[in-house]
Image (cartoon, rainbow, N blue to C red):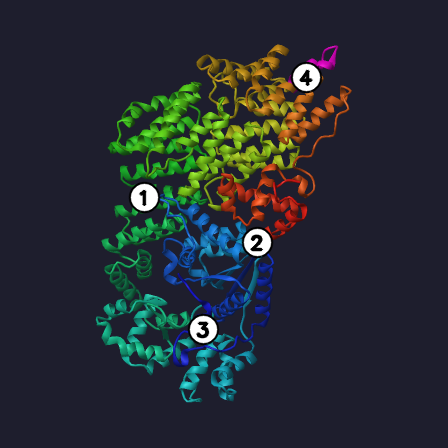
């Protein structure tokens, strides 16, 4: 794929092959539609156009006219054109086009997953351009686009919908690549305008003939034009062939247009034109048709066994005949239909042999591996060692930006190898791993099962099962992961390094499953050995493992000490290394801090971690960073911001097509909506959380359990709420309790007591007692213990002690709950006046947090006590309008007015760009607008520019 100037395409070629100056015929309706979309974008709103049609129907020509019109309208045009050889290319041509025109980009991240880096870099460049002038992104022949560009085209149009960008894709009707179909579906979902270019009427074909000939076509030519089925390119070729045949011999024959494939008549026309060329030109064109739409003359000369100089006369003849153009560093066919016709005129055996020879020749000069790979695939098997090496390189280059495409290529290569070739199993293992990074996990696991059924050697089977285990763990199915790991460990004669990897993954899985004893038993010297390793990733991984086992055992101080050491050790490594969540040291440290008195430190660590993950392109980790931050913000009572972070977690997972969204994110959104009072939304989020929680209940599933119980409690189903908690948190150990934040623990006891399940409440109390016995360093644990004791024993002094302890922390909703609980207890006495201040304090706290439902409940309680207080404040719900904007959303508005991009706003506020994206989405929805232009106008009208507030 290359950057193009579509307006210049019309002038390409020489002699009678040129079409410069010919007017566009028969597309007035389409051009009017394009003009309308250009005006829409000039007005500040994004738009989308898909131009679809058969080869030669005029898609590229329409794009050329669009390009010229856009430039006249003041658009900045970013244009790329794909080539058939780009289908295995690494990187994104759209990114290259932006770089070539001067946009600054961050350096490529040294990571195995560059999808996030790719998206954010291109998004930032386009958004910056759109601030200066409206932008048109034009992709011709998108059916051949490189996988990374297709990924960008699937994702960014929706993300940048509020920017002044027109997205235009031209694609062949018969495009069969699944990724291309998904791009089309996503654009259609966004409301793309569909321009299907059909055959031109006969009268328009006659106009085209007159344009070329400078006079009205003869009756004989007019009859021949009826045979091109309205295809303008074929009409042009027929007119030229007719003219070359001295206006009447009919040498071109009557073209018909069967579908699919190249019309037989057109192939005959091309063959007839070849008959009039010297042999050198014919051979050059035939070899070139195999090499691609653009090809290197030196490569063609080597395949012909000739020196470049001896082909000059043939080049000149092909140029003069209008079959080739030479505007760039390589020769190019004037239209791909010409190349396809030439190629299809070659016998199939000749074509495949030439593809194989082309692969050898290109590999010999160090051509890009994607180009070589395409020729090898087209040649079919068998393949030699050099070809396998090149193909494997192509897979590795493709995997960071397009893991699904890399997996498909790896499987295709494997199909070319002998069934017993060891490299075949390695390729299929890689393919499964790459698919595991996407949503195609069922396909990945099916591939593992199919490969295992072939009876691989023990080492190969162990590697396959390890890949499957990691995929299962990423998907949340820890039980299935453990099955694969144990079967792998039972295999004989495994190398020590493989056995260590299996044991480490198994120990981590046992932590996920909450079986800390088994995890500690699996250690068997692994940690001690790890500390002697020269690999910093191994050392850090051991520290994190020890921290996790200490944490879930309730030794919080030791867990924090190890987590901070791991994070510090990782920070000293300049090159960085990449562990999977939650084993990333800083991410685990933040999660552990959520259960301590250092909750404020959690926010800093998570912000730093999010931004570093974005800078390094570690997209697969971002949903976890956002979900962890959502949990921490929920713990702090910042409901609005918690919901935004949870939504950002889900949005990033969706953009990157990550295996399974983090169920904590849906659970947090359900808990927030329960507090706000929108139980319908809460149910929707809960269903999604339970669907995403996998088969285990330790790692993230307990969040869904908590949300289920809280929803049933909000609906007045006391028994169902208590039943939802049965067996989830009460085993006398702190392990399960520590999975959710301390502010939720008294609520678990309250729900159990309402449902007459005192045993579950006592289990939580026992777990707290065990936790304090092992580590009494955290004041928040003591506060929660007093709160729980107050609920269990209806002890006002314990509740008052909890309130005092909570006031020195930063968990306002926990404080509000304790105040409300004490108020309820005091309200049962003869003198209820002592309860009122506690209810009032609780009401003020929940109102400030945006917990509308809680505020309404407490307000009703105060009314029953005779207090005539103000009506509940509607915090973020209600009809669209300026008053519904949250504090965080208002902070963004002055920066939008100043013309900052979302990335620049994120940098200014020191938050994730995905957090900003989510805030902007909410602002547009609440204000019922679609563009930044409208937001700027509203802000200026309201005088809300200086500080972002009313």
Q: Which residue is mark 3?
A: 10
Residue closer to the observer: 76 or 343: 76
Mark 2 vs mark 1: in front: 2
Q: Is residue 48 left or right of residue 844?
A: left
Mark 2 or mark 1: whose residue is earlier in sequence: 2
Mark 2 or mark 4: whose residue is earlier in sequence: 2
Q: Quadrant of the N terminus?
A: bottom left
Find residue 546 and report its horizontal and vertical position in percent.
37, 24
CA gap between label 3 and label 1 equals: 55 Å
Mark 2 or mark 3: whose residue is earlier in sequence: 3
Q: Quadrant of the C terminus?
A: top right
- In this picture, which residue range is highlighted in magenta? 820-834
* Numbered mark located on residue 580 in the image: none
Mark 2 vs mark 4: in front: 4
Q: Residue at the location (40% across, 29% down)? A: 509
Q: Are marks 2 and 3 in contact (CB under 8 Å)?
A: no
Q: Is residue 795 visible?
A: no
Q: Which residue is mark 4?
A: 823
Residue neighbourhood size for the residue with mark 3, other residues' Cα within 10 Å, grouped as few (<14), some (14–19), many (≥20): some
Residue closer to the observer: 344 or 38: 38
Q: Is residue 15 visible?
A: yes
Q: Which residue is mark 1?
A: 454
Q: Are marks 1 and 4 in contact (CB under 8 Å)?
A: no
Helix, strand or loop at disc 1?
loop
Find residue 575 and report its horizontal and vertical position in percent.
32, 39
Mark 3 or mark 1: whose residue is earlier in sequence: 3
């Amino acid at each position: 794929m290359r950057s193009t100037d579509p307006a210049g395409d019309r002038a390409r070629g020489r002699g009678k092959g040129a079409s410069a100056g010919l007017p566009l015929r028969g597309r007035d309706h389409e051009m009017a539609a394009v003009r309308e979309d250009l005006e829409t974008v000039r007005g500040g709103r994004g738009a989308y156009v898909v131009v679809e049609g058969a080869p030669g129907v005029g898609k590229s020509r329409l794009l050329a006219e669009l390009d010229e019109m856009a430039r006249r309208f003041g658009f900045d045009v970013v244009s790329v054109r794909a080539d058939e050889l780009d289908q295995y290319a690494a990187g994104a041509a759209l990114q290259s086009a932006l770089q070539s025109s001067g946009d600054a980009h961050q350096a490529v991240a040294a990571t195995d997953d560059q999808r996030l880096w790719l998206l954010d870099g291109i998004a930032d460049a386009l958004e910056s351009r759109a601030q200066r002038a409206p932008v048109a992104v034009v992709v011709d022949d998108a059916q051949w686009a490189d996988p990374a560009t297709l990924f960008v085209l699937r994702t960014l149009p929706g993300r940048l919908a509020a920017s002044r960008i027109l997205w235009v894709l031209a694609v062949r009707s018969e495009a069969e690549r699944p990724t291309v179909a998904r791009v089309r579906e996503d654009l259609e979902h966004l409301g793309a305008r569909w321009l299907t270019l059909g055959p031109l009427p006969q009268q328009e074909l006659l106009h085209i003939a007159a344009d070329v000939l400078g006079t009205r076509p003869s009756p004989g030519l007019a009859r021949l034009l009826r045979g091109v089925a309205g295809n303008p390119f074929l009409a042009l070729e027929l007119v030229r062939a007719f003219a070359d045949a001295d206006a009447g011999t009919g040498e071109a024959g009557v073209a018909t247009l069967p579908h699919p494939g190249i019309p037989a008549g057109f192939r005959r026309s091309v063959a007839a034109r070849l008959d009039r060329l010297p042999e050198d030109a014919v051979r050059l064109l035939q070899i070139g048709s195999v090499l691609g739409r653009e090809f290197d003359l030196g490569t063609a000369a080597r395949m012909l066994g000739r020196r470049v100089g001896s082909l000059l006369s043939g080049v000149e003849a092909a140029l003069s005949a209008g079959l080739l153009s030479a505007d760039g560093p390589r020769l190019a066919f004037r239209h791909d239909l010409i190349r396809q016709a030439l190629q299809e005129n070659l016998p199939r055996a000749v074509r495949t042999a030439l593809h194989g020879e082309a692969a050898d020749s290109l590999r010999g000069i160090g051509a890009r591996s994607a180009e070589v790979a395409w020729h090898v695939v087209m040649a079919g098997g068998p393949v030699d060692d050099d070809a396998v090496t090149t193909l494997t390189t192509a897979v590795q280059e493709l995997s960071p930006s397009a893991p699904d495409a890399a997996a498909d290529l790896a499987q295709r290569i494997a199909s070319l190898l002998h069934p017993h070739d060891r490299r075949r199993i390695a390729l299929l293992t890689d393919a499964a791993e790459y698919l595991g990074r996407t949503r195609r996990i069922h396909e990945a696991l099916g591939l593992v099962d199919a490969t295992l059924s072939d009876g691989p050697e023990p080492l190969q089977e162990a590697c396959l099962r390890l890949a499957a285990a990691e995929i299962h763990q990423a998907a949340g199915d820890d039980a299935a992961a453990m099955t694969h790991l144990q079967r792998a460990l039972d295999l004989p004669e495994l190398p020590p390094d493989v056995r260590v990897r299996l044991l480490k993954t198994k120990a981590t899985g046992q932590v996920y499953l909450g079986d800390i004893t088994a995890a500690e038993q699996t250690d068997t010297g692994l940690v001690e050995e790890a500390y002697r390793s020269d690999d910093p990733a191994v050392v850090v991984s051991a520290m994190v493992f020890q921290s996790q086992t200490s944490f879930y055992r309730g030794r919080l101080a030791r867990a924090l000490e190890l987590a901070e050491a791991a994070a510090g050790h990782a920070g000293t490594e300049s090159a960085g290394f990449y562990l999977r969540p939650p084993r990333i040291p800083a991410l685990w440290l933040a999660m552990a801090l959520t259960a301590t008195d250092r909750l404020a430190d959690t926010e800093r660590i998570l912000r730093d971690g999010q931004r570093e993950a974005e800078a390094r392109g570690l997209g697969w980790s971002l949903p976890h960073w956002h979900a962890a931050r959502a949990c921490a913000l929920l713990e702090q009572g910042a409901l609005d911001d918690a919901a935004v972070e949870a939504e950002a977690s889900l949005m990033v997972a969706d953009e990157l097509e990550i295996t399974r969204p983090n169920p904590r994110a849906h659970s947090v959104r359900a808990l927030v909506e329960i507090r706000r009072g929108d139980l319908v939304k809460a149910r929707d989020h809960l269903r999604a959380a339970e669907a995403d929680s996998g088969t285990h209940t330790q790692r993230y599933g307990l969040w869904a359990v908590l949300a289920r119980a809280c929803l049933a409690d909000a609906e007045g189903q006391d028994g169902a709420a208590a039943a939802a908690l049965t067996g989830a948190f009460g085993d006398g150990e702190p392990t399960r309790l520590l999975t959710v934040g301390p502010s939720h623990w008294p609520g678990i006891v309250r729900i159990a007591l309402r449902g007459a399940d005192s045993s579950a409440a006592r289990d939580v109390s026992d777990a707290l007692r065990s936790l304090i016995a092992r580590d009494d360093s955290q004041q928040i644990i003591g506060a929660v213990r007093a709160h729980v004791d107050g609920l269990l024993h209806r002890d006002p002094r314990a509740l008052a002690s909890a309130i005092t302890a909570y006031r020195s922390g930063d968990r306002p909703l926990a404080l509000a709950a304790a105040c409300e609980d004490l108020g309820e207890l005091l309200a049962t006495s003869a003198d209820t006046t002592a309860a009122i201040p506690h209810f009032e304090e609780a009401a003020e706290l929940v109102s400030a947090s945006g917990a509308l439902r809680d505020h309404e409940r407490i307000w009703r309680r105060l009314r029953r006590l005779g207090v005539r207080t103000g009506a509940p404040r509607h915090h973020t719900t209600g009809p669209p309008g300026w008053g519904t904007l949250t504090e965080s959303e208002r902070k963004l508005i002055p920066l939008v007015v100043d013309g900052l991009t979302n990335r620049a706003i994120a940098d200014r506020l020191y938050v994730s760009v995905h957090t900003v994206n989510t805030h902007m989405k909410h602002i547009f929805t609440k204000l019922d607008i679609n563009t930044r232009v409208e937001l700027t106008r509203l802000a200026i009208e309201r005088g809300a520019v200086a500080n972002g507030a009313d």
